[in-house]
Amino acid sequence: MIVEVISVGTELLLGQIVNSNAATIAQRLASAGLDAHYQVTVGDNLERLTGTVAQAAARSDAVVLTGGLGPTPDDLTRDALCAFAGVATVRDRVQEQRIRERVRKMRGTLSDSALRMADYPEGADPLPNSVGVALGAALEHNGVHFFALPGVPTEMTAMLDAHVLPRLKALSGEPAVLRSRLLQTEGLGESRVAELLGDLNDSVNPSLAYMLHDDRTRVRISAKAATAAAADAMIDKMESAVVARLGPHAKPGPADDQVA
């Protein structure tokens, strides 16, 4: 199953905030053994956002969107999903009451725009927000599964863990684990390391990739298997082959460089 991540917000394109949500989602997907092939960032523009959703639907099985579920006019994720799927928004009355009560406790003034956070696309499953008040949504359209999550990192992470990852795992079928390990090298450039590893670069699972850090080349070995133990065994075998070819230039990576 191919998963795509769409981050929504002009502030991300302007570099005003760091897109930590995309990294969190990527890490969670990898830990669950799910393949994320694409990450896209799009600004707060309905036409471009709707087009990005359509593009994702054409190439991915599941799409996780983060951001654009707030109360202001530039929060357009619901609108884009509705425009793409050709549906209207509906209001969750329980969530509406929750918003009203929250505003009352804060002694604030309730605005119509605040109630937009209780809306979701018709036909979708509303995803409860245990940390905030903006509803998420899980929408299936023409065989593609869309998950809309808030942009606030704490809200996004809670909803991702509680509601999205379990659904994605169920959709993906057989359980899988994606593991990665980094090896450091010394005294060799990136291109020379790749040359020495030769046909090992053709391996798909486990696979090799290269990263340059502090002027040192790192080799990332990744493997996907039904269990962590099986994936680690595949990595161990590939690591032995890599070390054999690189000889004294290969150095074990820091312990914290292993990604579950």
Image: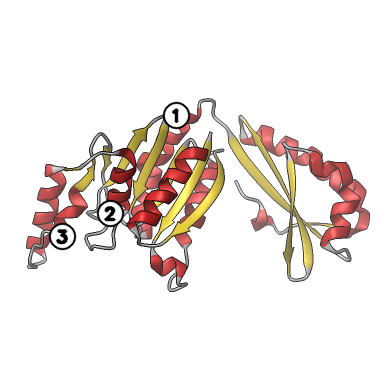
Which label belongs to residue 113? 3
Residue at 84 percent of width and 53 percent of height = 194
State which quadrant residue 199 falls in.
top right
Colour scheme shown: secondary structure
Q: Amino acid at mark 2?
A: Val
Measured from the top left, where is residue 123 in percent x and y?
A: 25, 34
Q: Residue at x 89, y 66 (%)?
A: 187
Residue toward you, 74 or 51: 51
Front position among marks 2 and 3: 3
Query: Along the polypeptide, which appears first: circle 2 or circle 3?
Result: 3
Task: Examine the rendering and report whether any part of residue 157 can be seen.
Answer: no
Between marks 3 and 1 in the image, the one whose residue lies nearer the viewer: 3
- Dot 3 or dot 1: first in sequence order is 3
Q: Which residue is mark 2?
A: 131
Q: Which residue is mark 1?
A: 170
Nearest to the observer: residue 252 or residue 88: 88
